[in-house]
Image: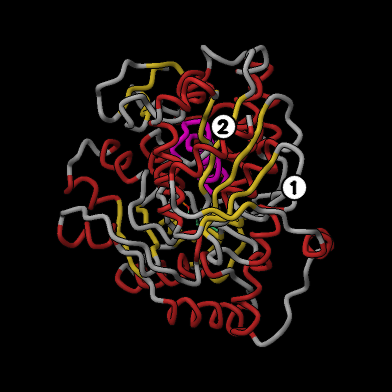
Amino acid sequence: MKFYSLHKQSPVVNFKEATILGQAPDKGLYFPEFVPQLDKQWLHHIENHSNEDIAFRLMYPYVKEDIPEEKLFEIVTASVNFSLPLVRIHEDIFTLELFHGNTLAFKDTGARFMSRCLGYFVRNADKKVTVLVATSGDTGGAVADGFFDVEAVDVVILYPSGKVSSVQEQQLTTFGKNITAIEVNGSFDDCQQLVKQAFADEELKKRLFLTSANSINVARWLPQQFFYAFAWKQWNHKATPPVISVPSGNFGNICAGLLAMKSGIPFNHFIAACNANDVVPKYFQQQTYKAQAPVATLSNAMDVGDPSNFTRILELFKHDFNELKKSVTAYSISDEETKQSIEELFTKYRYTADPHGAVGYASLIRYLAKHPNEKGIFMETAHPVKFYDVVEPILGNRIKLPAAVQALMQKQKVSTKMNVCFDDLKSYLISKR
Ligand SMILES: *Cc1c(COP(=O)(O)O)cnc(C)c1O
């Protein structure tokens, strides 16, 4: 498979180069030259296959020239090494729990896949690799966990000070060894902007072997298709394919879902479930895309004002607005509705949701109210424990912290404070080398 840059100014590359570069030299996102088609018979009997086999099957067309089959199998096995159950909420509503991995959010799968690919690709490199990553909360922890103690790889995480939950912050700042955290006095978009600047900087490029681990990296984006195949595998109403509601921030996860649909998994429709950061819902109303300053909400991993992956969605639909509208609906859910949804899920169904999943649920309810004959799945993207600061006061009772999280909360936080200043970041990265 070849990947081209969406800005169309850089040469096409293979999976290995796309993974190492992260972003194309012309600053475009990489996109596959074609969408591989899954075999219809295979999809029809998908429940006969193990998660590892399904994951292998999905990734093989993208990586077959770059990773030997045995290695790929090892990588996908490590990426889906936890349960991803479809849980029934009621007759028409289900949730796919994506949070049973090490850092309790769906990003574990993509981060594990990417870290192992990168480790494999740079195994003989002469320069140490620096993975530079901006996080709104969950990416950093997943990437840190994926790369922890990987030889010849340093991870530098930028996160917005005071805008991540306490569990998230502990995950970012307590690994030590090859993982360092920079606490930026600004928003997630500021962090993302700093990272983009670093990749565009000629001097840094010469002195360091820099790469990204954000969801723009194809090695993080593509394996998120697994979730949608696993949802289909566990779906018992194959004659009525589900509507899928995806809590969305940078739009990587939903874009992977749409790619899975274009590859042949017969989903009825997708819902982009957003919080108050409503660039995409507004796009669907007005047909113009206008980046906004992000606003802070209860579902902080989705506080994104200029979602990077949205351009991939447009490409996937060949920039045909009407086609896109047939497959995707977008809603913006307020913090008030998010709280009500957390409460409703608990009092009506004894289900404890995190704020991101609650946005997914609220959006799905809104859609089903207009489409009463359909059934749906919302993606539960984080464990409620990760956001106990939000969830506990709403439910009025304590969420039991798993032992691993209790231990995490006792660890000493280590971070470097920094203003939104590219020169500071640059000197820091050079001095660390
Ligand atoms: C990252 C994240 C999201 C948003 O995912 P995108 O792929 O950026 O749209 C939603 N929920 C949680 C818990 C997350 O960590």
The residue that appears at 66% across and 24% down in the rendered structure is 119
Residue 390, numbered circle: none
Image mark for residue 430: 2
Q: Residues within 10 Å of mark 1 (few under 14, many from 20)?
A: many
Element carrying mark 1: loop
Residue numbers of the magenta segment: 216-232
- In the foreground, 2 or 239: 2
Circle nearer the viewer, 2 or 1: 2
Q: Quadrant of residue 188?
A: bottom left
Residue type of the residue flagged with mark 1? Phe
Residue at 62%, 69% in the rendered image: 387
Circles 2 and 1, Cβ within 8 Å, touching? The answer is no
Residue at 43% in and 72% down: 362
Q: Percent position (x, y) of residue 77? A: 70, 32
Visible in this render: residue 7? yes
Find the residue positioned furthest to the bottom.
396
Which of these two is toward me, 23 or 32?
23
Residue sitting at 29 percent across and 57 percent down? 280
Residue 258 or residue 88, whichever sits in front: 258
Q: Earlier in the sequence, mark 2 or mark 1?
A: 1
Question: What x and y, as percent, mark residue 416?
Answer: 63, 52
Label of residue 175 in the image:
1
Quadrant containing the C terminus in the rendered view:
top right
In the picture, measured across the screen, residue 314 lies left or right of residue 187, that is left
What is the x, y in percent for residue 206?
48, 20
On whether residue 345 falls in the magenta region, the answer is no
